[in-house]
């Protein structure tokens, strides 16, 4: 007798399949067809790795400090994951212009997060780099402080969010070997921003931290380099997307922005025109879990996932090539919900 309905169930009504249940006795080819159609019930992950990096702060103008890196948190959570989760990728702080007077403080970065049942992870945006004589802003990592107007004492160091980053460097004024006003470097996830000195010039940004969640060891959340005047060296940004600062003796160019999707801080600028500071780099959220578990089944509109902009009806595929045995989802912009 031929099988009229799936599941070997002889009934006037065909058996119902959903991602939650498939009652009956099923042939292997029917199961495989349903799996490929994403309608067969499969297990949501019981453990996920995450990397959450906030947007970096921007540097300041007029001998300004470098922007602090966005806060960084990474860990593994073992729990049952099901239902909906909110994902937000924080933007970097906007660049500021040179105003020809005493400068303008940079802007802080924005928070990144993933939140839902069994997980609530939120990181703080990077602190802003500070203008001449001011203290860098508090953030995931603190922003670099602006150049001091006193040879007797530096500007104070900024503060950072515990467990997410490090403090920014201090700014100085030097008279030997020549008059120099130099901003401090922004803090990074792996190290504090460097104080300005005659040797280092405007303080280099603090180094970021590495993660191999995507399958490749990569630096994230480096601080921005400080800006200044009276020298010929360029203050570097920290590994992990930190932008370099600029000094007036070598260039009248704008400072370098933090790299997108690293949470790097932007560089501080000098006093010459155009003298715009570097913007902070945007943040990133990455989740990874064993490939034996099901794909994420839904993405609300507006998220950018593995290079695909979601519309609410399309379902981006996981990256299974970069890390053997794992499904990796990299969120690079937007805010919205996902469903396992």
Image (cartoon, rainbow, N blue to C red):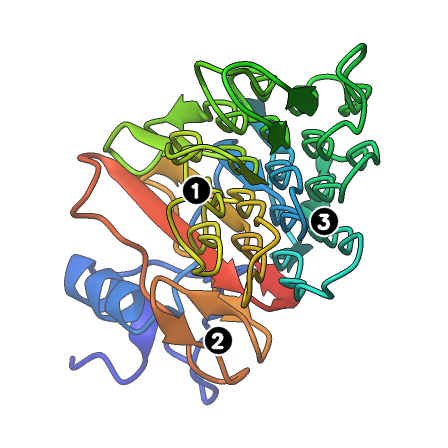
Where's residue 55, x and y in %?
61, 49
Residue topped by disc 2: 16
Query: Of marks 3 and 1, which one's residue comes earlier in the chain?
Result: 3
Residue 263 shows which numbered tag?
Answer: none
Residue topped by disc 1: 244
Residue topped by disc 3: 111
Q: Residue at x 22, y 35 (%)?
A: 325
Q: Quadrant of the N terminus?
A: bottom left
Where's residue 232, x and y in %?
38, 35
**Residue closer to the observer: 292 or 104:** 104
Task: Kindly report the distance in space between the C-alpha atoms of the residues bearing marks 2 and 1.
Answer: 59 Å
Q: Residue at x 73, y 44 (%)?
A: 128
Q: Label 3 neighbourhood size at 10 Å, few (<14), some (14-19), many (20+)?
A: many
Where's residue 21, x and y in %?
52, 60
Element at label 3: loop
Image side of residue 132 versus residue 196, left or right: right
**Residue closer to the observer: 143 or 249:** 249
Q: Label 2 neighbourhood size at 10 Å, few (<14), some (14-19), many (20+)?
A: few
Q: Is residue 180 above or below residue 90?
A: above
Q: Residue at x 46, y 26 (%)?
A: 208
Element at label 2: loop
Residue 175 at least partly seen: yes
Image side of residue 177 versus residue 80, left or right: left
Residue 9 at least partly seen: no
Q: Label 1 neighbourhood size at 10 Å, few (<14), some (14-19), many (20+)?
A: many
């Amino acid at each position: 007798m031929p099988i009229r309905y799936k599941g070997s169930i002889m009934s006037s009504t065909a058996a119902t399949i959903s991602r939650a249940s498939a009652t009956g006795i099923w042939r292997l080819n029917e199961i495989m067809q349903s799996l490929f159609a994403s309608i067969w019930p499969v297990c949501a992950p019981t453990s996920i790795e995450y990397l959450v990096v906030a947007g970096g702060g921007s540097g300041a103008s007029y001998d300004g400090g470098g922007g602090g890196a966005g806060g960084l948190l990474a860990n593994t959570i073992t729990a049952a994951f099901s239902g909906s989760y909110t994902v937000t990728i924080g933007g970097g702080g906007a660049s500021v212009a040179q105003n020809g007077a005493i400068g303008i403080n940079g802007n802080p970065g924005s928070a990144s997060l993933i939140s839902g049942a069994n997980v609530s992870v939120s990181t703080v945006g990077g602190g802003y780099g500070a203008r001449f004589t001011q203290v860098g802003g508090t953030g995931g990592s603190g922003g670099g402080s602006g150049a001091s107007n006193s040879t007797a004492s530096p500007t104070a160091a900024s503060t950072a969010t515990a467990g997410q980053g490090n403090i920014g460097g201090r700014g100085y004024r030097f008279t030997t070997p020549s008059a120099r006003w130099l901003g401090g470097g922004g803090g990074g996830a792996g190290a504090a921003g460097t104080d300005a000195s005659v040797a280092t010039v405007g303080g280099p940004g603090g180094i970021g931290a590495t993660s191999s969640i995507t399958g490749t060891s990569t630096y994230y959340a480096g601080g921005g380099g400080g800006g200044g005047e009276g020298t010929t060296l360029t203050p570097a940004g920290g590994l992990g997307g930190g932008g370099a600062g600029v000094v007036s003796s070598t260039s009248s160019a704008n400072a370098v922005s933090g790299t997108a999707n690293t949470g790097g801080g932007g560089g501080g600028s000098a006093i010459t025109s155009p003298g715009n500071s570097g913007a902070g780099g945007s943040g990133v959220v990455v989740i990874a879990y064993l490939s034996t578990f099901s794909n994420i089944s839904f993405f609300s509109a507006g998220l950018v996932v593995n290079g695909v902009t979601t519309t609410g009806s399309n379902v981006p595929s996981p990256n299974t090539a970069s890390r053997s045995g794992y499904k990796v989802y990299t969120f690079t912009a937007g805010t919205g919900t996902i469903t396992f």
